[in-house]
Amino acid sequence: MESQEKRWYVLHTYSGYENRVKSNLESRAQSMGMEDYIFRVIVPEETVHQVKDGKAKDIEEKVFPGYVLVEMVMTDRAWYIARNTPGVTGFLGSHGGGSKPTPLQPEEVNRILSWMDDEGPQRTDIDVAVGDHVKVIAGSFANLNGVVTEVDHDNLKLKAEIEMLGRQTTVELGFDQIAAVE
């Protein structure tokens, strides 16, 4: 089943190879004349403020470690090129046996892309503890609810379990990205 509509798909990669997969896929699309089928390849990242050994610095962290987003027209050839790119272990939403993957919903993609374009201000006035329920109000996980599993007051971050892509996932969030659920 080929589609002539460009949609967003999620590639699963070896962790730490996301940028290499992005570069390899872009090169393969160009060298194999597939620019009309493979459009944008994105590795969502966020700037994280870290304090280590008393020194503050901003670093770039992957929002979805082990995943790369690709906008493409799902033809047999484009699918073959993407899934056989070095470092790619498969497509999210593909059930094996030659089945084509399920594309992301437009609202999921819009939420991720708008979050990448506009990150909100830092917020420090929230009091949360392990086990608290929170609602994500900003970022790529906006409008999702989660349960706090870890809190780092010094760095204004926490970890929470949310349901994403059909399974429970631990995500790291800034205090500016959440609101307590009463």
Image: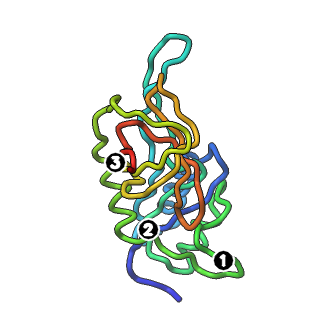
Q: Does residue 89 appear left or right of residue 115 in this picture? A: right
Name the residue that disc number 1 marks.
95
Q: Is residue 8 above or below residue 182?
A: below
Check disc 2: other Cα within 10 Å, few if <14, some if 14-19, many if 20+.
Answer: many
Name the residue that disc number 2 marks.
8
Q: Does residue 146 appear left or right of residue 96 in this picture? A: left
The image's mark for residue 138 is 3
Residue 97's x, y, as percent? 71, 81
The residue at the far bottom in this view is 1
Task: Give SS at disc 2.
Answer: strand
Of the two numbered discs 1 and 3 on the same chain, state the one appearing first in sequence. 1
Q: Amino acid at mark 1?
A: His
Q: Mark 2 and mark 3 in contact (Cβ < 8 Å)?
A: no
Residue 100's x, y, as percent? 58, 79
Looking at the picture, tell me which residue is in the foreground, 163 or 50: 163
Q: Amino acid at mark 2?
A: Trp
Of the two numbered discs 1 and 2 on the same chain, state the one appearing first in sequence. 2
Q: Is residue 167 above or below residue 175?
A: below
Q: CA distance from mark 3 to mark 2?
A: 21 Å
Q: What residue is drawn where x is 54% and y is 41%?
A: 159
Task: Give SS at disc 3.
Answer: loop
Q: Nearer the viewer, mark 3 or mark 2?
A: 3
